[in-house]
Amino acid sequence: MVVFSFTPLAGRLFSLLFLSNAVFARPARSTVETQGAVLGRSDAPVPPDSLGLVSSGTDSLYFTNITLGGLQLMVQLDTGSSDLVVNLRGRQLDVNNSTNIHVKAQYVEGEADGVVAFADLQLGNVTISNQAFLNVTDLTNFNTLGDGILGVATTNGSTVFHTLINSLGEDTAAKLGQSPMQSLFTQRPDLASTFDLQLGRSNAVGDIVPSTFLVGEHDKNFEQVVNAPQLPSFSGAHWSAPMDHMTLNGQNFTFNSTILVPPGKAAAALDTGFPFPLIPAAAVDNIYSSIPGAMRNPQDDLGWIVPCNASTNVSFVFAGQDFFVHPLDLTIPTVTQVAASDGSMHNSTICLNTFHGYTEMPGEFAGFTLILGDAFLRNVYASFNLATGAGPFVQMVSTTPDLSAAITEFQTKRSADLATLPPVLDPATFIAMTQANAGSPQTPSSASQIADSAATPTQSAGPEISNGAAQLTVGIHGVLLGAALLPLVFFM
């Protein structure tokens, strides 16, 4: 077993000023800000061999340190892509080979242009020799944060790899163009071909609990993951798993199947590049309409405003096992300015849905029914296995096994978070004040009204395969504009 040194993440400051001035993208006359700005870590223990992983602010994205060609970089860890993409911004590193092979990595919104280069990549105390990466020369329509992205999906989803096939042939591409994790396990056959993730959960003011990123071994507290069902990852471009159904307050909510998974299963992407999961709109309505006092924003058909101290019982079921969603991961406290009767603006706090709805899945995820991002993944310890025999698979253990304990923790932590924020508005008051300010005659929908019109808990939801791009404009929570900027690249 190789011992990985903990990558020091404390004290690394990003220019995240745009986070504290994030504009609420819903068409309402209010400016919403999401709390949090600085990367850091608490004193909570992490496995001694962890490579180190930390979130930005309020769990928006997860970052780790790498060393590429002797240059230390902070990159987003992304299970939804396969390439190492870096924006050097004029900095120099020791490249083994630089090419003029052009690569354009396109995403749901935006693209990264650059050339293929090769350099030694260090993760902890393990070096991957001559790793192919995309050296960015131009970015289009991307917000900026960090130095790039470390895609940890399989080589089959690598844009760099397929570009090298076209330029140099399959044999050369197979030798030089593997994705970072597959390069590591090819060069180090003594290591188990696994990497494990456990995403930490911060509070509303951005204090961060360290996350776990282990390669070739398991956290001793979750060694039982080796006995968990092996969920086949059916997509080369994204880590994924077939899902049974969602359970809401003990009742099943099923989703449509697609050709990616067996009948009766739902195709779920497991994507750390999505802070907020993307699921069918009917499923979102079923979740949040079950919370007393929750109201749909009348100016955003896909958004919900939820009482900050309220929650519901939601789990996602894989291979017959329930994975409960912690109540802290179902809503996010958000600071907004609202107008008083005298016209003055005041900061207030509301809570918004973290599971976002869609009416059409982004084309890049054609065939998927759900994209289970960080708000779900914080509730699992996941081991990703790049086994070459039967194909890659995922094993998961719940980190929220006791829902009663989670509810108690939610009440304590949410109260503590709200005590540090401006006064809380309940959904009805916030919507009434917003409409009065806008002069809107619209009537908001209450939870009970939506529950009557939404799909029943046993009704299927989710589209068949679609190649269309998502037509979504949803509120900015943290960094991402809903799913519009998935999965990558947040450079400074």
Image: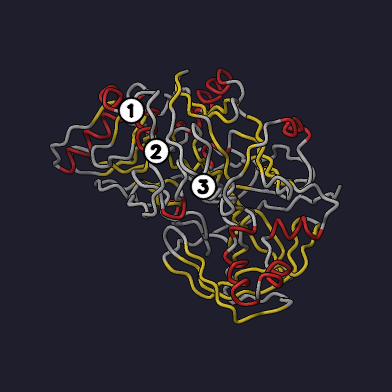
Residue 253 drawn above or below residue 344: above
Q: Residue at x 75, y 70 (%)?
A: 130
> Can residue 277 be seen in this snapshot?
no
Tag 2: residue type?
Answer: Gly
Q: Is residue 412 left or right of residue 355?
A: right
| Callouts 2 and 1 close, C-beta under 8 Å | no
Q: Secondary structure at mark 1?
A: loop
Which residue matches tag 1?
455
Q: Residues within 10 Å of mark 2 (few under 14, many from 20)?
A: many
Q: Residues within 10 Å of mark 1 (few under 14, many from 20)?
A: some
Tag 3: residue type?
Answer: Ser
Q: Is residue 343 left or right of residue 468?
A: left
Q: Secondary structure at mark 2?
A: loop
Q: Secondary structure at mark 3?
A: loop
Q: Quadrant of residue 206?
A: top right
Q: Is residue 19 left or right of residue 286?
A: right
Expressed as whole percent of the image width and height from the top left, the position of residue 221 reads 75, 31
Q: What label sits on residue 60 in the rendered view?
A: 3
Expressed as whole percent of the image width and height from the top left, the position of residue 469 reads 37, 55
Q: Nearer the viewer, mark 1 or mark 3?
A: 1
Q: Nearer the viewer, residue 316 or 463?
A: 463
Q: Nearer the viewer, residue 100 or 439?
A: 100
Calculate the distance from the C-alpha at mark 1 to the C-alpha at mark 3.
Answer: 30 Å
Which residue matches tag 2?
462
Q: Quadrant of residue 400?
A: top right
Q: Residue at x 46, y 31 (%)?
A: 419
Tag 1: residue type?
Answer: Ala
Calculate the distance from the C-alpha at mark 2 to the C-alpha at mark 1.
Answer: 11 Å
Calculate the distance from the C-alpha at mark 3 to the C-alpha at mark 2.
Answer: 25 Å
